[in-house]
Amino acid sequence: MDRPQFRYQPQAARPKHKSYTWVLLILSFFCIGYVYLAVKKPLPPLSLSTSSVTLPAEKVTIDWPSEGWAAIGSMNSGLLAKSASQETAEPIASVAKVMTALAVLNKKPILPGKDGEIITLGAQDVEFYDKYISLGGSNSRVTAGETITERQALEALMLPSSNNMADSLALWAFGSLDNYKTYASALVKSYGLTNTTINDASGFDSATTSTASELIILGQRALKNEVLRAIVAEKNADIPVAGPIENVNSLLGEDDIIGIKTGNTGEAGGCLLFAAYPKSDSKHSDILIGAVIGASSLDSAFSVSKNLLSSLNATYKLRDVAKNNQKIGHITSKWGQSADVLASETLSTYAWEGEVVVGRPNISQQYKTVKAGQNVGSLQTGQLSVPLVAGQTISGPSILWRLKHYF
């Protein structure tokens, strides 16, 4: 029997395209994943640059006194100008009682609309009264055993400028006049008044001194205290024993003057720290403050103060810090789009023309895209502000840019 014949047939080669398919699949998955990750990757924040807007000072004329020293300022801005570049600390007479009132209210606060604690006056208080009677200083009559509220005592201090009540309040609040001097001296330093010296509570001592420019800051402090601000605006009051009392500030109520304190001694001359609402500002958004020391008399200090206030009012006006749609900054993206940062409305403020006024931009957060008109922050000067908006739209980048900038 013949054996069957077997022929060798070589195995067919595996098609190469199946290997390529796997490679293509892997590459496809990689590409799809890359595109997905590139699209989903968080965008870099926009670059935003802004700059402050500065309204320069204009040349103004102030009617400075020919005698003594003076300074002007405002509640919002503090010191604006002074009559002499180099000041010498001088006696300030009863203007020192502003510091006494602030120290007492700091130690023994009174809630607005309240009268504060009850003070019982004793033999020492009668001695204070007798002392100033003999010295010819301003005073309010007191008796031993008399009771008076803290507010009434402050009214006696600030309206008729009672020297004996200054000492009585200092003794009551601090235990001794020396303790008061220590406390008040530390307080003035905390206010930044480096050229002010407190040597007594009444200001009758000529060693209690200050400068006109530092009195502007003291005036600011007084106006910030709601109780004291109300008291210095009173034309009259009624207190125990002494009865009706009158404010010696004869300018009170004239030219929108709302206080603050007179002073007058032989050594100090006439002194006045005053505050008034600007005539051009019907909303009372600021308060003008002036100080005069070393005038020949209190009447002279009154006259000088009226001239100063007239100069201030003439140059205290509504000023445009930034106009509507004024460019304040610029926004740029890393993918080439940009937009302006614009003031959405005019920012105006009442300010002295001799003062530099600055509008400062405040950006609220980081952005990755913005739409035209979108709020991106604010432009602020003092307590006033207007929104800042994007002038154009910055949308997200193209897919191509994302793919090129993944890494």
Image (tube, rainbow, N blue to C red):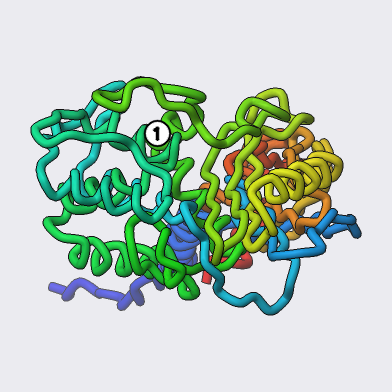
Q: Is residue 290 left or right of residue 230?
A: right
Q: Is residue 158 left or right of residue 273?
A: left
Relative image position of residue 293 (x, y in whole percent): 62, 60
Q: State the residue in front, 321 or 245.
A: 245
Q: Residue shown at 78%/30% (left/top)?
A: 280
Q: Is residue 84 above or below residue 128?
A: below
Q: Is residue 359 above or below residue 224?
A: below
Q: Is residue 335 above or below residue 365?
A: below
The residue wearing badge 1 is 226
Relative image position of residue 389 (x, y in whole percent): 69, 39
Q: Residue shown at 53%/57% (left/top)?
A: 265
Q: Is residue 313 left or right of residue 407?
A: right
Q: Quadrant of residue 346?
A: top right
- Residue 39 visible in rendering: no
Relative image position of residue 102 (x, y in whole percent): 35, 49
Three-letter code, disc 1: Glu
